[in-house]
Image (tube, helix red, strand yellow):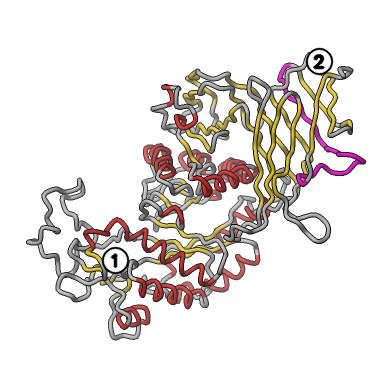
Amino acid sequence: MESVMQDMILQGVPVDVQWSDIDYMSEHEDFTISKKFAELPRYVEKLHKQGKRYVVMIDPGIHARFGEGYEPVESGVTRDVFIRNYTGGYLVGNVWPGDTVFPDFLYPETVTWWTEQLTNFSKTLQYDGIWIDMNEPQNFYDGSREGCPWSDNLEKPPYYPGVRNKLQWQTLCMTAKQHQYLHYDVHNLYGWSEGRATRTALLSQRPNNRTFILARSTFVGSGRWAAHWTGDIRSSWSDMRATIPGLINMNMYGIPLVGADICGFQGDSNKELCIRWSQLGAFYPFSRNHNTLFARPQEPTAWGTEATAIIRAALLQRYRLILYLYNLFIVSHNDGTPVMQPLFMQFPIDHNTYDKDRQFLLGPGIMVCPTLEEGAVSVWIYFPSVRWYSLWSLERVSEGGEAVEHYPSPLHTINVFVRGGTVLPVVIENEGVTPTAQQVLNSPHLSLYCYLDNEGAATGALFIDDGYSEDTSRPVHQVNFTVSEQQLYITPVTTPVVTTGVSEMVRTVTSVKIAGVVLSGDNVEVLVGNTPQQHVTYNTKTQLLIVTQLQGEGGNPVTTDTVIIVTWRQSGHY
């Protein structure tokens, strides 16, 4: 773990979180650390000093090692937190540690017991988030060690799902008894209820701090307290393609923070697949590379310097766009709008968008068109019926309503486009520096990228808070950006009040790029308020206006805590 992280840091690959699968456990028992990982607590302290986070896996199944001093199971028995079978005894399943019992997370006493277990474990291992796996719940027995009462109608209903023709296949008996319910009635809520209990536990450790929980099994409403990943997918081109509709669906189900294992999980990945998947995964709402045991290494530094450079460049795009992504999650939190969207969500009257599942939108403004075929150096792209620009060059590429059959997509490139009418706050890249997400969010300087629609208008927003508080009354800095009639308005909506100086949430706008500016000549005058700008370039052919080293009145910086109007016009036109 430590050597991989160090290699990533040395090669400049941005990484924020180190994860531990169940390998760190002693005999795969929850709330234990094996002798092989005895130095893990020290390593986690080191990660924290580097500004990184650590997430640890905890499975719901508790090793049924009764009477041997294993505290989680002994205290669970004392407090009667485990699911029982139809005879009233404990339902014993089989998961990674061997025979296991399963907590009933819908029982209030179980939530208290789970909170105590996680809190005690945090004193040994200072995790920042919890990864809950196997929580369908999965069971390597079909039902239980003793089987299920097959004569009961709940075990053999008149219909079956298309999974091995058994409701109990690799899960619990339907007649299992949870304190207030039969398992048949609440099976689909098991992961949901574990997520809720885990959130309660984390909040008890860090009151009013946002929690991070990653869950394999989720249900309607799980998005309130958990992220989701798509489980143990294969390292294949077909599985990579399938992640796009899968993640879109989860967003539409109300779970916006969702992703798939970049480069795949089951089986060996390869260099080209991992590069293309890393490019795609850089734009997943939740972005993580996760590999299975004994498979070929697939971290970004495992494929040679060329591949590492390509993957690094893809990931850094995510960091530069983090303010836009952060705002999307704020909007999703407030009104449920998906972060990752199908094309038809923004273009419902364009019938050509209905079957497009190889490209997607991030919010209303960004369209991602990855390369999903082995050996491909071009992609088929449909541009919905508005104006579109290339993300970083700001080149206008389409007026919309058209398909391009062979859009160039060399190995080092993922095609990302911006809808006309969008303003993006972009973090300025610091050459030679590999940032963490928190450092990027706290960066004091930004640039505004304005992509005008065919009426010369665009809008955008910036939302800054402390990055960790849950309290809805927390200080926030919210700014709207509006372009209309050759003017850019920077309008603060809310700004924290501080006793001295300026709030650290306020940002300085150092440059502006505006695409789609229609003027008759290259000589352009730009004013910030009434102050002429000295560093202006405009190209009538590309219609791109760039203003750097922005200065306000008296040479002061342009900051987001006051109303600013940036005006451009042909020189000599008043």
- Provide the secondary structure element on which disc 2 rests: loop
According to the image, label 2 marks what residue? 521
**Image x and y of residue 65, in percent:** 29, 79
Give the image quarter of residue 104.
bottom left
Who is closer to the viewer here, 89 or 145?
89
Seen in the image, is 255 located left or right of residue 155? right
Question: Is 122 located above or below residue 195 in the figure?
Answer: below
Pick the front one: 162 or 33: 162
Quick one: which residue is furthest to the top in this view? 520
Q: Which residue is mark 1?
A: 95
Query: Residue shown at 11%/65% (left/top)?
Result: 149
Label 2 crowd (10 A; few <14 / some 14-19 / many >=20)? few
Identify whether 441 is placed above or below 52.
above
Q: Residues within 10 Å of mark 1 (few under 14, many from 20)?
A: many
Q: Is residue 560 magenta?
A: yes
Residue 453: percent from the left, percent from the top?
63, 23
Q: Is residue 487 left or right of residue 200?
A: right
**x and y, in percent, of residue 289 in the image:** 48, 51
Q: From the viewer's perspective, tell me whether residue 215 is left or right of residue 18.
A: left
In front of the other: 391 or 275: 391
